[in-house]
Image (cartoon, rainbow, N blue to C red):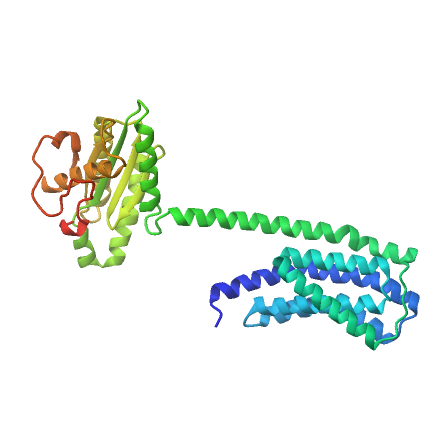
Amino acid sequence: MMDATQHTRGLQLVKRIYPPRSVGFFLGAISVASVLYEQHASPGSWLMIAFSGLVWPHLAYWRACRSSNPYAAEKQNQHLDAAQCGFWIVMIGFNLLPATMGIAMLGMVLLSLGGKDRCLIGMLTYTLTAVVTWLLSDIPLQLQSSLETQLASVPVLLFYPLLIGYSAYRFALASNEQRKQLEVVSRTDGLSGLYNRQHWEQHVAEAYTRGQGEQHAYSLIMLDIDYFKQVNDRFGHSAGDDVIRQVARLLEECFQPDACLGRYGGDEFGILLPNCNAAEALMRAEAARQHVFTHFHSQSPATISLGIAELDTDTTSEDHSDWILHADLALYQAKRQGRNCAVCYSQMADAPLPPGPEIRLQNTRPAPRGQIAG
């Protein structure tokens, strides 16, 4: 059974094809009608060309929209498009201009919609229909196109390629916008609206590489929300999600536009500060801590603990993992000191590290934040 996304995409395809089909069949019918007029065609032929030019495009659109599988219905409509073109090419005696024009326009549409495979299938349908119609009819050949037929073919030759080009342009714009939206989604955390962990770490890694050859300082801040587990247990996960969103907005107010903010996971956030040494980062961390405290103090107590680490350009580490580790160790120390404070790694570098299985210094991260009580 087709899911909602596939059904929506099928409807989008149907709606995209509807205008070119309507204009193409209408203008093509005018060209064919000019030949039928010269042949003194029967009323039945006039009814059929009226159906093709005026009724069929709207019937095809209605049929595909009402289908449970619009994409499959539209593929069938394209086979019927090709069959009608093959039928009329015989009915006008293979008149050279309308025949050539019909093949070219049909191929253009099929290639733009489904590539060479769809085009080949459509042309096969066109050919088989033309052969069967020719075998069952006695329509005489009328290869030469009169002046009237040439004039009747001008609108489709002039306007239909422009319409196809405009439709392709609109589709390219929509595809480009969709690609940009997907790029934003792929690098954004859905809850906080900040960068997700993967994209944020990519920025940290790039800063780590640049920092080895630059004189500019870089600093990292790792922070999390104090006693966040108690917020979830007491007020529910929806309240916890709201706290994360609010903290993210408060951090943006304090650190943007120069900083790179990301949600590292759970209630933990990471902040990359370019052109900022440890002392400056500590001042900004303290300002952010106070900003969060002031905001939540009037609602419900909520505080943050922060760890700061400046990039060590003399490090022998091959990647940025130790840099994040140092900031996280400083964060751990801030929690041991009572929470709602900021600690700089350089201030604790000479102090012995607290014991515990969650501390590992050999290019690994501290244990998940769940091992530390909020």
Using residue 25 as the reference point, say whether residue 219 is left or right of it: left
Instruction: Note whether 137 is above or below 143 in the view shown.
Output: below
Percent coordinates x, y for residue 147 in the rendering: 92, 55
Q: How many marks?
A: 0
Using residue 365 as the reference point, say whether residue 275 is left or right of it: right
**Residue positioned 62% across, 67% down in the render:** 75
Answer yes or no: is residue 296 visible.
yes
Q: Residue furthest top?
A: 215
Q: Quadrant of residue 263?
A: top left
**Residue positioned 87% across, 54% down in the render:** 151
Percent coordinates x, y for residue 298 in the rendering: 21, 45
Answer yes or no: is residue 50 visible.
no
Percent coordinates x, y for residue 160 in the rendering: 74, 54
Residue in front for this viewpoint, 292 or 97: 97
Instruction: Note whether 247 is above or below 43 in the view shown.
Output: above
**Residue positioned 72% across, 49% down in the render:** 162
Residue in front for this viewpoint, 364 or 251: 364
**Residue positioned 15% across, 43% down in the render:** 360
Q: Quadrant of residue 32?
A: bottom right
Percent coordinates x, y for residue 87 in the rendering: 78, 70
Instruction: Note whether 347 is above or below 155 in the view shown.
Output: above
Residue in front for this viewpoint, 78 or 159: 78
